[in-house]
Image (spheres, rainbow, N blue to C red):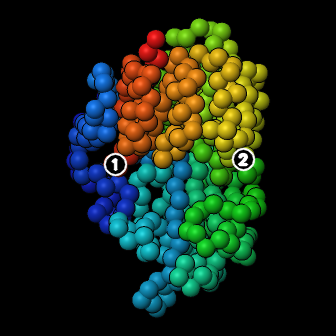
Amino acid sequence: MSATSSSPTSVRCSHFGTCGGCSHQDKAYDVQLANKREKVLAALAGLPDLPAPSVIGAPDIWNYRNKMEFSFGDVYPPVPGKWLKLGMKPKGRWYEILDLQECHLPSPEAAALLASVRAWAEREKVPPYNSHKKEGVLRHLVLREAKNRPERMVLLVTTNGQIPKPSFIEAVQGVYPATTILLGSNVKASDTAISDSIEVLTGTGYVTETLYFPDGAVDYRISPQSFFQTNTKGTEALYGLLRSWTRELSSQSTVLDLYCGGGGIALSLAGAAKKVVGVELNAAAVADAKANAERNGFKNCEFYCAPVETLLPSMLDLNPAAVVVDPPRAGLHVKASATLLEMAPPIIFYVSCNPESLGRDLKLLSAKYAVERLVVVDLFPHTDHVETVARLVRRD
């Protein structure tokens, strides 16, 4: 477990109990880890010959998140002189906004940024978006922060991009060390921070992060809407584990990375395998993966934009030594599971953010695979969320 497992139970944030975020910060960290281990075991109950899981705690339990999405909302009932709220959704009330004064998940400077952007919007009279009336401008404020490099991104998501841009830039740069500032437009009714178009106001339009491993380092370009694990230090532990497992294979091995996103896992394994092939449906993420491979000088990585279930049969014809799967919360597509069982690669590394879908998929795969190793990795201290990594070996 992490060296921070003896953390005290004192509550750090004044919003605790109201905010929908760190709902377990009143529990000692070793208790949080034990609870997550039991949660994973409960979801995997019934699997034959399940090994006892080891636990890797988060290196940092505060200020660990490299991405945060904050929401704007109007003040109701109206308060004289108060124009809008900026913060998180209160626990159990997704139609409201908790006006955050502090948050200990991103960098310490984030609270000052929220206050400055809130004051800017009130000063410039830029209205927040009202999802019921379908009117207003300001929707989300998204932060992406490199933890191992001095790079930070601020993305303001609006309905139409019509804001006073110079004063917004000043409001950000006056309190927060942003290296790139962006303006996004989202005309859809759905309450998401995904933009239809993005304008770069300052900087490059992306941040670069470096993950360090005992035997090397990898750089990643992270675009505003590409996926990257939100806990950088914890990701070094997670990807480092997969890297060490890959080194146990032949140095001439080909490894497949399914649901590869921006190439996070694939690039981490590039130095441990002869060839790594990734598949991802998100075109922007695939572009990031290719750019990241070029940035690092990796000639042994290939990335394809396609549904995993469509491309998987031809990929398995490459006779990979191992297949890495890191699916979304819903788990493996039913066709992907069927193809894995039919073609039966020798080893599968399953990375999961959802113990329930992991349990379902492992029970399906248990027809041909045994769980040889099981590791619980905490990337989200003070929350219910937990990552699990399973090494599956084909029953020959």
Q: Which residue is mark 1?
A: 384
Residue 197 visible (yes or no): yes
| Residue 167 place in picture, x, y as percent | 69, 72
Between 313 and 274, the one nearer to me in the picture? 313
Q: Which mark is residue 281?
A: none
In this rendering, the answer to whether 255 lies above or below 207 is: above
Per the image, label 2 sits on a secondary structure element best described as helix
Q: Which mark is residue 284?
A: 2
| Residue 267 place in picture, x, y as percent | 64, 28
Query: Residue at left 66%, top 9%?
Result: 252
In this rendering, the answer to whether 61 lies above or below 248 is: below
* Quadrant of the frame with the N terminus: top left
Amino acid marked by disc 1: Asp
Query: Residue at left 42%, top 25%?
Result: 367
Q: State which quadrant residue 387 falls in.
A: top left
Between 24 and 392, the one nearer to me in the picture? 392
